[in-house]
Image (cartoon, coloured by chain):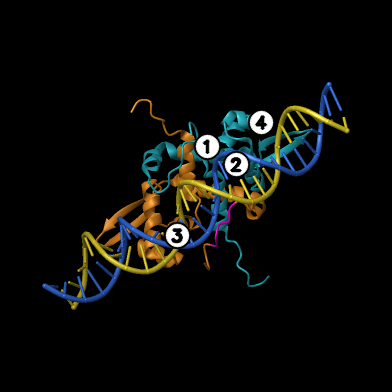
Chain colours: A cyan, B orange, C blue, D yellow
Amino acid sequence: MLITSTTSSIDLQAKLFRGFADPSRLSILDALHDGERTVSDLVQATGFTQPNVSNHLSCLRDCGLVTVRQQGRFAYYTISDDRVAKLLLLADELLADVAKGVYECTRYNVKDSKNG
Amino acid sequence: MLITSTTSSIDLQAKLFRGFADPSRLSILDALHDGERTVSDLVQATGFTQPNVSNHLSCLRDCGLVTVRQQGRFAYYTISDDRVAKLLLLADELLADVAKGVYECTRYNVKDSKNG
DNA sequence: ATAAAATATCATTACATACTGATACGATGA
DNA sequence: TCATCGTATCAGTATGTAATGATATTTTAT
């Protein structure tokens, strides 16, 4: 594979950010903030359906943002890297100043993560 | 508006990350890294069409990630906040370790930002 | 006044992806 | 062995959004 198009750093970055660009996944990451949780824990914490949670987890796992520890029929998920939490924190800080603009931005409409 | 559903912090965060979750917008932000640029500059730097660049810029502007300075018929765009660059840098660092997983993640397929 | 340049906006189209319901799989306990 | 639990996977659907081409708007130059 010589002349093939290498996936640029920018494309990977975009893909990484997509991992964070969904309220469901953010809710899950938020629920993982205090330590490892089973899928059922996360289902209960978020109110999402179990397949939905599992799908998002598999996405986050593939991207290396969370890791799994299998124990019996339970799967314990954890945030894999401190920088994930760091990134979320930095985003929150930035948001504190630009929240109004983000809120009013009509380009994309994120549906409410709660009371769907 | 009393009983209305307040947009949660998580929804806003997701929306903010969406601003970064697109290769075109990242390319534009990347091109803005060294200072302010006109729309034409960005069109040339990225190879995207002018309406496309303008659309993304208006999105980034609404979200407060870039600011504009009008001068004659030119519009000079700048990254508005240091933390935007900081966030991108942190993402790059994280990516250095999880890139393989992100690359192999099949959940979403970001199309190549170059050679479209 | 006219033409050209720089930018913004609009409608349309095509595609990506989040969600759901059904189901399969593996592990545990009776 | 059988039933149940926890989790993963799949196909189908609906929706959101990025890109395009056309056009409007404002500014500068001749």
* Callout 4: chain: A
- The residue at 37%/39% (across/down) is A100
Magenta range: B108-112
* Foreground label between 4 and 3: 4
Please, what secondary structure does the residue beneath circle 4 have?
Answer: helix
| Upstream in sequence: badge 4 or badge 1 | 4
Determine if the magenta segment contains residue A110: no
* Callout 1: chain: A
Question: Residue at label 3?
Answer: B31
* Callout 3: chain: B
Q: Do the residues indicated by labels 1 and 3 lie within the same chain of the protein? A: no
Instruction: Give the percent coordinates (x, y) of residue D9.
Output: 70, 47
Q: Tag on residue A89? A: 1
Majority secondary structure in the magenta region: loop
Disc 4 residue type (three-letter) = Ser
Q: Do the residues indicated by labels 2 and 4 lie within the same chain of the protein? A: yes
Mark 1 residue crowding within 10 angstroms, few (<14) / some (14–19) / many (20+): few
Disc 2 residue type (three-letter) = Arg
* Foreground label between 2 and 4: 4
Q: Tag on residue A83? A: 2
Disc 1 residue type (three-letter) = Leu
Mark 2 residue crowding within 10 angstroms, few (<14) / some (14–19) / many (20+): some
Please, what secondary structure does the residue beneath circle 3 have?
Answer: helix
- The residue at 37%/46% (across/down) is A106
The alpha-carbon separation of the residues under discs 3 and 2 comes to: 25 Å
Question: Residue at label 4?
Answer: A40
